[in-house]
Image (cartoon, helix red, strand yellow):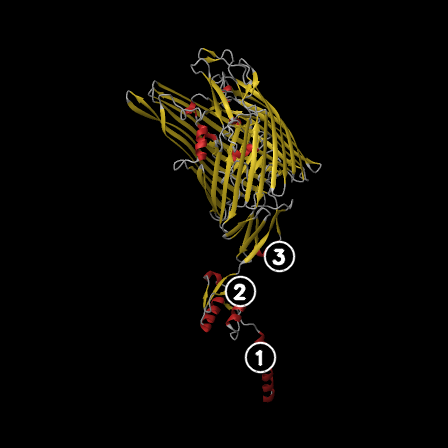
């Protein structure tokens, strides 16, 4: 090849290869190197977290571009946020991505409030419309969405439809949730469920007349058919039953104490007790005890991703609450209350103390004895740990401890010397519970729970005149274990089977030092229960049936009891609901009530265990038929019921007449009607309820075999109105009922020696009871993290003195003395609570 040709070929190759080399992209460079180069050339400083840019490689920006354009180029390439803090300082942060949407049930399309949405260390909860907003660090970050009863969603941010806050649909888990069939039964947060139970949801609760805070056991008395014949939460009467016939549960732990202040307020802190279910009839076969009714309280089942808490003060106690996450899958709740009477006495405290001290040694001792240094205190502490170690497991641990105490000195002058002796009364409860559930597959799950519940009542009555110390103790120790396996046989049918073991030990002690006397009685009873139940709902969700059967073996008595259960709810003709409930039940514990001198006359109830002889096993049978009409914010509900309970004793019924110290077994029958009419307006809610009850005792061994029950409140009316205007909630309500039946002496022959000649049992009736209550609550946000709730209430606004009970005692003056126990007078209360979240 000639020299000219070689030169031309070389020239052509250079001409063609030059542009080809210019089109090849320059290799990506480490972002760290590029930032150092820009810093050196432009005399600026970048601030960033080292792990934020680690491993990122991008094309280098053209050095001929201005600093601002180079920064914009890097922002586009990296997806990071570059922000000038000053002319020479530039901060680099992750670009925040906003995720929003509406969480809904996939089948019903209903919003799912209180759903937890979490990504990394940040999280939020949906509001009542199911709406949420969450800031996510990067498109690859995982977002976890959890709601009880639905399958959790784990999805990277980039796979969500982020346009226009689109709905996120959740599929129901295998576990069937009880559904609300009548929402806002009285007020918002009080609903009727498809299994026949009433539910109180304190997260949605608004206001009830006379209550400045959500007292758990006072609130359930707003439902028709529920009375407290003496205004206490330690004597709640459900359809004519005595209080000891109520099963009280706190997170599946059976409790033997109800109230603080010896029954005037609930001992269960509403801050940690989010939901309460009241079941009068038709309970699950998994439940035992409670022949008259069940009050089941529960803590929150949702792991809270954010810290929240509260500090509160009212005219009775100071209280606090804390809900804090412990990592991504665990949260803890703590709550406590303490009486403020150690520091100062409020009008509310004075009225409460006056009420509990009526006809006791605290109020009125012997003529030669004076009382001094009276001190009263109560407190409670509750804790709940909730953990979800895996997607299939849920673990819950509970603890509760409560205490009531009253102490006073009895003083007298003996032989010219002043002598003082201390009397005291302590009431304590401590309980621990462990609960675990696991979803082994989409259609099979297991549930296991164990609890230990202890209750102790201890009184020292010092008689300064007789130089005598009388010690009384009543203690209950109970252990319970329950295991349940549930299987979904189809989309509409679920079958559950389980085993339940309960060991109960009750001890009663009487100890006198002068003369020396000691009596200790302890009894233990173990019960084994097996049960099977099915839950079925129609595909259109118009019909729900829960049916089951429970077999109980009482080990000590070698006795087997079979108990069927049923609840049915059917919706028809668009606006109507039909409800059928029925159950057989038994229980092995009851209370001895003595109004004379037990426990200083303050707490008059001691637990005792059935012995299958003179203290029989209590057995019940119940049935009810209800019809509801719901249309255009109107609700009309009517229920007819009957109940028969056998195995009761006269000692458990609170007699104050000739049968007060008689020990005899019998039964009672109750039947009646409950009516409710409720109307809702935009900001106004009104209701009117009426209850008719006829309850009759039958004691075959007594002189009079058949007579009215002590809890036979023949007619009861309740009405209320609530109004909401923005942040203010107002409530006004009235309660009227016929008086309690009682027995009076024979007019012409009242005494026979030291004994009173009584007329026919419970033939007389106290005058009617009437009470008017008001309350107001103000809720507001001070900032994004702090809220405030202030309230004021007035119980018995008209200051009407209602007689609650009456009885007669020999007076030595030729005629018996009548003693009347009266209700609370006008009782104010006020509260202030600071909320943190």
Position above or below: 92 against 756: below
Position above or below: 205 against 566: below
Q: Position of residue 427 (x, y in %)?
A: 42, 30
Residue 711: name its quadrant.
Answer: top right
Q: Position of residue 24 (x, y in %)?
A: 57, 73
Q: On the image, numbered disc 1 is attached to which residue?
A: 18
- Measure how far apart labels 3 and 1 are at the Cα level: 47 Å
- Residue 369 marker: none
- Measure how far apart labels 2 and 1 are at the Cα level: 31 Å
Please name whichever residue, 265 or 208, is drawn nearer the observer in this view of the structure: 208
Assign a secondary structure to mark 1.
helix
The residue under the point 44% across, 10% down is: 753
Q: On the image, numbered disc 3 is attached to which residue?
A: 163
Q: On the image, numbered disc 2 is attached to which residue?
A: 78
Q: Residues within 10 Å of mark 1 (few under 14, many from 20)?
A: few
Which of discs 3 and 1 lies nearer the camera? The answer is 3
Question: Circles 3 and 1: CB distance less than 8 Å?
Answer: no
Which of disc 2 and disc 3 is earlier in sequence? 2
The residue under the point 53% across, 13% down is: 703
The quadrant the N terminus occupies is: bottom right
In the current view of this chain or complex, which residue is farthest to the left?
A: 416
Assign a secondary structure to mark 3.
helix
Question: Circles 2 and 1: CB distance less than 8 Å?
Answer: no
Whether residue 344 is visible to the viewer of this picture, yes or no, is yes
Direction from residue 663 to residue 635 in the image, left or right: right
Please name whichever residue, 287 or 184, is drawn nearer the observer in this view of the structure: 184
Residue 621: name its quadrant.
Answer: top right
Q: Residues within 10 Å of mark 2 (few under 14, many from 20)?
A: some
């Amino acid at each position: 090849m000639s020299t000219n040709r070689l030169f031309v070929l070389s020239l052509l190759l250079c001409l063609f290869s030059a542009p080809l080399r210019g089109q090849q992209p320059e290799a990506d460079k480490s972002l760290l190197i590029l930032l150092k180069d820009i810093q050196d050339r432009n005399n600026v400083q970048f601030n960033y977290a080292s792990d934020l840019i680690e491993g990122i490689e991008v094309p280098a920006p053209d050095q001929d571009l201005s600093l601002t354009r180079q920064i914009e180029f890097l922002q586009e390439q990296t997806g990071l946020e570059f922000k000038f803090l000053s002319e020479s300082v530039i901060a680099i942060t992750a670009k925040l991505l906003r995720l929003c949407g509406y969480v809904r049930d996939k089948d019903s399309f209903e919003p799912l409030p209180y759903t937890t949405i979490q990504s990394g260390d940040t999280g939020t909860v949906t509001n009542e419309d199911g709406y949420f907003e969450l800031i996510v660090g990067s498109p690859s970050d995982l977002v976890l969405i959890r709601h009880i009863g639905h399958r959790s969603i784990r999805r990277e941010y980039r796979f969500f439809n982020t346009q226009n806050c689109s709905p996120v649909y959740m599929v129901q888990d295998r576990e069937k949730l009880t559904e609300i069939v009548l929402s806002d039964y009285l007020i918002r947060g009080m609903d009727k469920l498809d299994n026949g139970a009433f539910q109180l949801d304190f997260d949605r609760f608004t206001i009830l007349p006379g209550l400045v805070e959500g007292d758990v056991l006072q609130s359930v008395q707003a439902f028709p058919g529920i009375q407290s014949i003496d205004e206490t939460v330690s004597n709640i009467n459900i359809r004519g039953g005595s209080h000891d016939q109520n099963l009280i549960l706190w997170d599946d732990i059976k409790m033997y104490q109800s109230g603080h202040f010896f029954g005037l307020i609930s001992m269960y802190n509403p801050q940690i007790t989010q939901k309460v279910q009241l079941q009068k009839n038709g309970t699950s076969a998994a439940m035992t005890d409670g022949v008259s009714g069940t009050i089941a309280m529960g803590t929150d089942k949702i792991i809270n991703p954010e810290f929240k808490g509260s500090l509160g003060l009212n005219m009775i106690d100071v209280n606090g609450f804390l809900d804090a996450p412990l990592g991504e899958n665990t949260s803890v709740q703590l709550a406590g209350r303490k009486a403020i009477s150690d520091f100062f006495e409020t009008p509310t405290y004075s009225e409460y103390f006056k009420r509990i001290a009526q006809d006791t040694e605290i109020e009125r001792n012997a003529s030669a004895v004076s009382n001094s240094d009276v001190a009263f205190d109560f407190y409670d502490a509750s804790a709940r740990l909730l953990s979800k170690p895996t997607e299939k497991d849920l673990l819950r641990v509970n603890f509760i401890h409560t205490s009531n105490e009253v102490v006073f000195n009895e003083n007298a002058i003996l032989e010219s010397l002043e002598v003082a002796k201390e009397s005291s009364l302590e009431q304590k409860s401590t309980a621990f519970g462990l609960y675990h559930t696991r979803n082994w597959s989409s259609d099979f799950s297991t549930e296991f729970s164990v609890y230990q519940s202890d209750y102790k009542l201890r009184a020292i009555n010092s008689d300064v005149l007789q130089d005598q110390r009388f010690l009384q103790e009543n203690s209950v120790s109970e252990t319970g274990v329950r295991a349940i396996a549930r299987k979904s046989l189809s989309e509409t049918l679920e079958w559950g089977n389980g085993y339940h073991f309960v060991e109960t030990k009750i001890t009663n002690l009487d100890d006198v030092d002068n003369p020396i006397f000691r009596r200790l009685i302890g009894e233990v009873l173990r019960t084994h229960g097996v049960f099977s139940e099915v839950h079925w709902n129609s595909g259109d969700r118009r019909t729900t049936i829960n049916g089951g059967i429970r077999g109980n073996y009482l080990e000590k008595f070698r006795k087997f009891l079979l108990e069927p259960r049923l609840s049915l709810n059917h919706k028809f003709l668009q606006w109507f609901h039909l409800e059928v409930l029925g159950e057989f039940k038994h229980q092995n514990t009851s209370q001895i009530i003595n109004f004379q001198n037990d426990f200083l006359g303050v707490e008059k109830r001691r637990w005792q265990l059935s012995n299958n002889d003179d203290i029989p096993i209590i057995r019940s049978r119940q049935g009810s038929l209800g019809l509801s009409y719901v249309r255009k914010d109107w609700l009309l509900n009517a229920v007819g019921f009957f109940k028969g309970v056998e195995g009761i004793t006269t000692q458990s019924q609170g007699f104050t007449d000739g049968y007060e110290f008689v020990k005899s077994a019998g039964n009672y029958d109750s039947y009646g009607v409950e009516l409710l009419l409720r109307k809702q307006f935009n900001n106004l809610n009104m209701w009117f309820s009426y209850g008719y009850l006829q309850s009759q005792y039958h004691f075959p061994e007594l002189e009079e075999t058949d007579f009215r029950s002590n809890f036979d409140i023949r007619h009861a009316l309740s009405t209320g109105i609530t109004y909401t205007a923005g942040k203010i909630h107002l409530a006004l309500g009235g309660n009227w009922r016929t008086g309690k039946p009682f027995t009076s002496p024979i007019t012409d022959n009242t005494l026979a020696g030291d004994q009173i000649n009584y007329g026919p049992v419970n033939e007389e009736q106290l005058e009617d009871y009437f009470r008017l209550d008001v309350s107001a609550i103000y809720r507001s946000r001070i900032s994004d993290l702090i809220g405030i709730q202030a309230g004021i209430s007035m119980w018995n606004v008209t200051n009407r003195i209602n007689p609650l009970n009456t009885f007669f005692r020999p007076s030595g003056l030729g005629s018996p003395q009548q003693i009347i126990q009266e209700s609370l007078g006008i009782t104010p209360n006020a509260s202030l609570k600071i909320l943190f979240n």
